[in-house]
Image (spheres, rainbow, N blue to C red):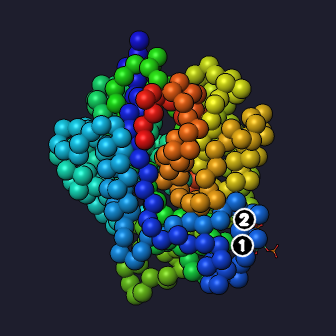
Amino acid sequence: MARTAVLAGLGGYLPPRRVTNEELSERFDTSDEWITTRTGIRSRRWADTGISTGDLAVEAGHRALKSAGLAPEPGVVDMVVLATTTPDQPCPATAPDVAARLHLGPVAAFDISAVCTGFVYALAVASAQISAGHADRVLVIGAETYSTILNPADRTTSVIFGDGAGAVVLTAGEDDQPGALLGVHLGSDGAHKDLICIPGGGSRQRATHGEPDPAEQYFTMQGKKVFAAAVNHMRQSTVSVLDAVGWTTDQIDLLVGHQANARILKSLARQLDLPEDRAFINIDQVGNTSAASIPLALADACAAGLLAPGDRVLLTAFGGGLTWGSAALTWPGPTPA
Ligand code: UT7
């Protein structure tokens, strides 16, 4: 039996302020009809001014620890991995502060930057640490406050993205145990880095003299080109991970994909010959929450009673970088809440 990372806890947290399509239609040249037909989104949550990604991550982390039956105290985890595109500040990483605020002691803590694929990258790193025997328990968090990087002059991105956080606890176990993370596949294509990016604020475009151009500090996305790439890469990545673990598509009980667009998830399901209702969708309520998307979707699917112990679950994501990744796991029992 191989030493494997096993899902032991799960939690999601959304900031309270719900922003509806109707509200956005008053601020932008858009409509509920356009947003729902093109994306499937009906509302999203935006954090109030002053609430940071780390604040949301602490809430989700608390919930995941609680669902794993762990008190937030030193020694309960060996590592905190936080996936985010919207860290509390460029330096230092947000994870050490989150670990400290969760009273987890002097654990290893670091951020992962893979945009909307960040959570799958973080899962891969955490599970490798466990499989190698370097860690026994890891808290993996995906957290975002995209509302802080959206360009108010860009109606397309402004209606798509939302804020939130989700977290899981991975613990050392065996690969025949329900909850085992059995396979991961990751990929990237930096040649298309400009399709999703924040042009300024880094070492390439330093704002050392004069005022930085605000437009360069905002998130940008070339939606049409990204759409096609998202479907292709998620399909190829899911097929790679299925081959690696020896599952066929019809054995998948639930596909929990990155919630970028309901049309992308339906198209992916069709291309995989999977009935559409096996592709979980919660984008209608949360929008695109980037690195928080998959753990939030898992928490919602779990709360909706769609996941039973032993179910075969496939995670898949795509995002800026470009990056993509997939993971195959069985659902644990008793189900984490
Ligand atoms: O999370 C990381 C990965 N992200 C993705 O995978 C996102 C992939 N892309 C998408 O989901 C879609 O491309 C979008 C939802 C971003 C856009 O949908 P689309 O069907 O590709 O629209 P489009 O960009 O081709 O725009 C169609 C029309 C344009 O008008 P014209 O040129 O046809 O007159 C846009 O100006 O829709 C217009 N438009 C809007 N209209 C009303 C763009 N945004 C809006 C808006 N409200 N918010």
Whole-number angstrom distance, CA of label 1 to CA of label 2: 6 Å
The residue lying at 44 percent from left, 20 percent from top is 177
**Residue 308 appears in which quarter of the rendering?**
top right
Q: Picture coordinates of residue 80 (x, y %)?
A: 31, 45
The C terminus - image quarter? top left
Residue ID for mark 1:
32
Report whether residue 30 is seen: yes
Q: In the picture provided, is 182 more to the left or to the right than 20?
A: left
Q: In the picture provided, is 238 more to the left or to the right than 167?
A: right
Q: Picture coordinates of residue 39 (x, y %)?
A: 70, 61
Residue 12 vs residue 263, the one in the foreground: 12
**Residue 277 appears in which quarter of the rendering?**
top right
211 above or below 236? Answer: below
Q: Secondary structure at mark 2?
A: helix
Q: Secondary structure at mark 1?
A: helix
* Contact, mark 1 vs mark 2 (Cβ under 8 Å): yes
- Ligand 1 located in image quadrant: bottom right
| Mark 1 Cβ and ligand 1 under 8 Å apart | no
Residue ID for mark 2:
36
Mark 2 residue type: Thr
